[in-house]
Image: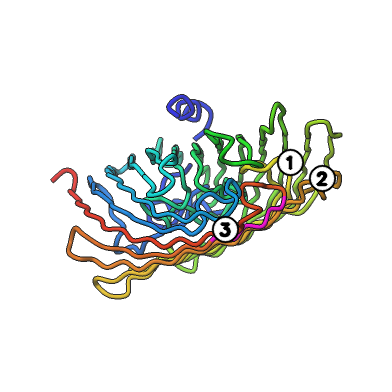
Amino acid sequence: MVKRLWLIIILFGVAPAWAQAPGIATGTSAMVIPPPVSGEPYPTEGSSLARSNYLSGGLIFNTAYTDNLLGGTSQKPISDISYSVWPKIALDEDTSRLHTLLTYSPGFTFYQRTSSYNQDNQNVAIDFSYRLSPHVALTLRDSLQKTSNIFNQPDLLAATPVSGSTQAPAVAVVAPVADQLGNTSNALLTYQFSRNDMVGAAGTFSNLHYIDPNQVPGLFDSNSSGGLAFYTHRLSREQYIGATYQYARILAYPTDAVSETQSNSILVFYTVYFKPTFSLSFSGGPQHYDVGLPLLPEFQAWCPSGSASLGWQGRHTAFSAGYSRAVTAGGGLVGAFNSNSATLSARQQLTRQWRAGLSGGYSIYKTLDPLLSLANPGGHTVSGSASIKYDLDAHMYVELGYTRLHQSYGSVAAVSAFPNVNREWISISYQFTRPLGR
């Protein structure tokens, strides 16, 4: 992870989050980095809960009941109860030119019946934003996640953020309880060369590794690398237009082989800011892809791609939704797929002590190679989570939640036999916050 972060520092750089909405910069003439190119997720909390210049920490205890723990790796659905504990520490320091956010949350999860899946968990995130000059900005991000269950997170509703970009990495198939390691790094360097014009360049790296392949029959490791270059023009204080070029190279690793997908996209985008924290974005354009599969002829073609997204952050509310269409690969699958995906996230502070949250997603993947239309046609995923949180006092809260997952992938043995998962959970948390420099 450290080597990759330094590589990004050398090669590229994502514009700093100087305000609560993605890509907002400070200053009366400073431009916004629109969501289609910022690479930054929309906020998941209302502005009243957002803060900077603090040191925070805490401890979370969680227990959950799952009705289908092992998926297709068992002859019938296996239910179980899990117990997790996560210490957490975060540092957020903001100065006139530098914003640093470090978060670390290790943990341990053990299961009542399937104790062989007990595992330590790691969640590490680094967010570094630096204004090199009044017109040049650099941000670097890196996140590492080691888990045995993607739905077993300290903050489940924030585990799958909503993005306005078609380049946001995604896991196509959610594995059942399986040891896995994921790492994502991205960076963006921007230069505002006039009052209403800006250019930028970005790089993104990600990988997905299943530690024990026997736990995920039909799923395979993958990694991706790519970049983009963009130009944006400010039509008015509220409206931005621009164009971007995107490149991606995705490798998947079926047994003793490699599948490679390369894509090039040219997209035109438009963003309107009704308020600084309320935006609507559209992008669209042609995408060219080139796919090489083991023992099969290489093929290439053109197709349309694009995205639409909306983000709103009020004092007590955060809501975001996004849709994207693009050719993609990896995420556990082998080959290239025409993907359509939609995500949403909402949080609302109901009263001083009560908060509610909701998140959901839908994605469908259709194979692009007609020779694989029967053996590996793709599939679809539908997921949703809801939670309610109650503050016991200034430092402790209790949260209850429910998650449902449905996956239909006939060629993936890990999920094809038992496609539905239901999970109910409850957590009790203690947290503290200390301001810095006081």
* Region in magenta: 405-410
Q: Quadrant of residue 319?
A: bottom left
Is most of the magenta stretch helix, strand or loop? strand
The label on residue 335 is: 1
Mark in front: 2 vs 1: 2
Question: Residue at horizontal 61%, vertical 56%?
Answer: 418
The furthest residue to the left = 438
Mark in front: 3 vs 1: 1
What is the spatial separation of the Cα atoms under label 2 and label 1, in whole angstroms?
9 Å
Image quarter hosting the N terminus: top left
- Residue behind mark 3: 240
What is the spatial separation of the Cα atoms under label 3 and label 2, in whole angstroms?
41 Å
Of the two numbered discs 3 and 2 on the same chain, state the one appearing first in sequence: 3
- Residue behind mark 2: 372
Q: Residue 82: percent from the left, percent from the top?
A: 38, 51
Q: Secondary structure at mark 1?
A: loop
| Marks 2 & 1, CB-CB < 8 Å contact | yes
Query: Camera-side residue: 142 or 214?
Result: 214
Question: Residue at horizontal 46%, vertical 43%?
Answer: 148
65 with respect to 246 (left or right): left
* Residue type pointed to by label 2: Leu
Q: Is residue 409 magenta?
A: yes
Answer above or below: position of 306 versus 329: below
Circle 2 residues within 10 Å: few <14, some 14–19, many ≥20: few
Q: Residue 4: percent from the left, percent from the top?
A: 49, 28
Evaluate whether residue 6 shows in this view: yes
Q: Secondary structure at mark 2?
A: helix
Of the two numbered discs 3 and 1 on the same chain, state the one appearing first in sequence: 3
